Image (tube, grey):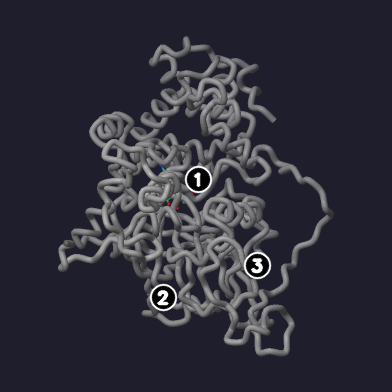
Amino acid sequence: MADQSRPRLTTTAGAPVPSNNTSQTAGPRGPVLLQDYQLIEKLAHQNRERIPERVVHAKGWGAFGTFTVTNDITHISAAKVFDTVGKKTEVLTRFSTVAGELGAADAERDVRGFSVKLYTEEGNWDVVGNNTPIFFIRDGIKFPDFIRTQKRHPKTNLRSPEAMFDFWSAHPESVHQVTILMSDRGIPVNPMHMHGYGSHTFSMWNKDGVRHWVKFHWRSQQPIRNYTNAEAEALIGKTRESYQEDLYNAIDGGNFPKWTLCIQAMPEEDAERVPYNPFDLTKVWPHDDYPLIEVGVMELNRNPENYFMFIENAAFSPSNVVPGIGFSPDKMLQARIFSYADAHRYRLGTHYEALPANAPKAPLHHYHKDGAMRFFTNDFGNPDAYYEPNQHGGPVADPGVQEPPLKISGDADRYVQPDADADYVQPRALFNLLPADEKARLFDNMASAMGPCSANVKERWLAVLRRVHTDYEAGVRSALAAADDVNAIPVTEATQTQAAE
Ligand code: NDP
């Protein structure tokens, strides 16, 4: 007799099951009967408990929270999420490392993903960025190659510093991001003590159709805190799950982390005037040129009830914008608009947006039809309205949410950045602002990361560093020598010009 105070165990079809311990056999010593559906269902489900992990950003940590508008930016954006100071919108965040697999240690030196889904009244707005304002490359056509260098070597099945630095030295625009990666901010102590960035340039338009180009900054209200390589190594020896522990426990204990959302706003016509390409993901907009404008505060205050359901199933995509917020010509953004939604269709299924983590809180009216996970209704109360246009009261498009026309023209071609020196200006500005002790750690971190590389790749990368700053090259060169990885090779004319085209 079952314990009447507890719910009855059932099959997934809802039928009560008589035993969860003993399979049905033809005699006391077996064999097992194929008709034991409880056994078969359990085994079949176990086989299907995993979905493909993300190719990048597989290891992640996340939570729910609230975004509250604190400053009026309606003169810049007509997005309803910003229309009233004090307005609150529910959010889901996911932070991640880029290269590691699902079981990777949290406190590794890597860029961190920083994704926020805002469930606005006009649909989900996803800001799918990183903890860095820039990225390694500026063109999505290089993304598969770049990620390949971050993943395992096909023969050794090991991560390959040789591949990473070989690739980076062939793409000098990467030195900006690699400098941040090798700086103190390459290993944040946990997601709460780092800033986030939308990284790409987006667009915003107001009710009069005036467009600004914008950058998003999530400024941590917790102090910026990072681990050194030695601290991270010691920590990983004790726990591989430090980010999950820190984030979960902080929220569970009522210590809710907060970030201030700021934008940089560039009038549309300035894009032609600034000395850098404002749509190049390897460049920031200097704060002096475009100061941060406060928009609101994000507070994370609720741990998901189920990790898989809300964090593994969470599908963030830069394609999710809402009226008043749009894209820009940024080539990486344009590639990700396709690539991220496509990854989710593969990883989660056709109707991944209907999963609880992704389902909009806004009214939903679309004509997409059947396929995996068609467990929602969209017949609009009239089954005849299943195509468009129709005379049966089905939903219709709203021209009022059309963004203003993009005033950009040019010949269709494959454009290479004309000024090779432009890629070194901003890394140099970053290098110059680092205090001496952080520079010393940057040299050591870089030397440690490139230590296993061949002499050829080391020299190619040192030549890139030299074009940023001679002190940068000299510092890394002497850190390499000190680590006994290379003999101190004197700087020559040849090494100065070895930066790959
Ligand atoms: P500012 O002096 O106004 O700002 C410097 C920025 O660098 C601050 O946001 C600071 O963050 C951040 N920073 C400090 N140390 C590091 C580090 N180790 N890794 C990454 N970021 C760091 O300068 P500018 O706006 O003129 O930019 C100068 C350089 O600063 C840029 O070329 C770029 O490399 C870097 N940077 C610029 C950002 C931007 O959006 N303008 C954003 C981040 C970096 P904090 O305020 O927390 O100290």
Q: Residue at x 43, y 34 (%)?
A: 182
| Residue 9 position in % (x across, y down) | 28, 61
Above or below, comparing residue 263 to residue 89 in the picture = above
Above or below, comparing residue 303 to residue 25 in the picture = below
- Numbered circle sitting on residue 71: 2
Question: Circle 1 sits on which residue?
Answer: 52
| Residue 134 position in % (x across, y down) | 53, 48
Q: Answer yes or no: is residue 412 visible.
A: yes
Q: Secondary structure at mark 1?
A: loop
Q: Residue at x 67, y 79 (%)?
A: 386
Mark 3–mark 2 distance (CA, rounded to whole Å): 22 Å
Q: Nearer the viewer, residue 56 or 488?
A: 56
Mark 3–mark 1 distance (CA, rounded to whole Å): 41 Å
Q: Nearer the viewer, residue 178 or 99?
A: 99
Q: Residues within 10 Å of mark 1 (few under 14, many from 20)?
A: few
Find the residue positioned furthest to the right: 411
Q: Secondary structure at mark 3?
A: helix
Mark earlier in primary sequence (2, 1): 1
Q: Answer yes or no: is residue 435 visible.
A: no
Query: Which circle, 2 or 1, is nearer the viewer?
Result: 1
- Numbered circle sitting on residue 226: none
Q: Residues within 10 Å of mark 3 (few under 14, many from 20)?
A: some
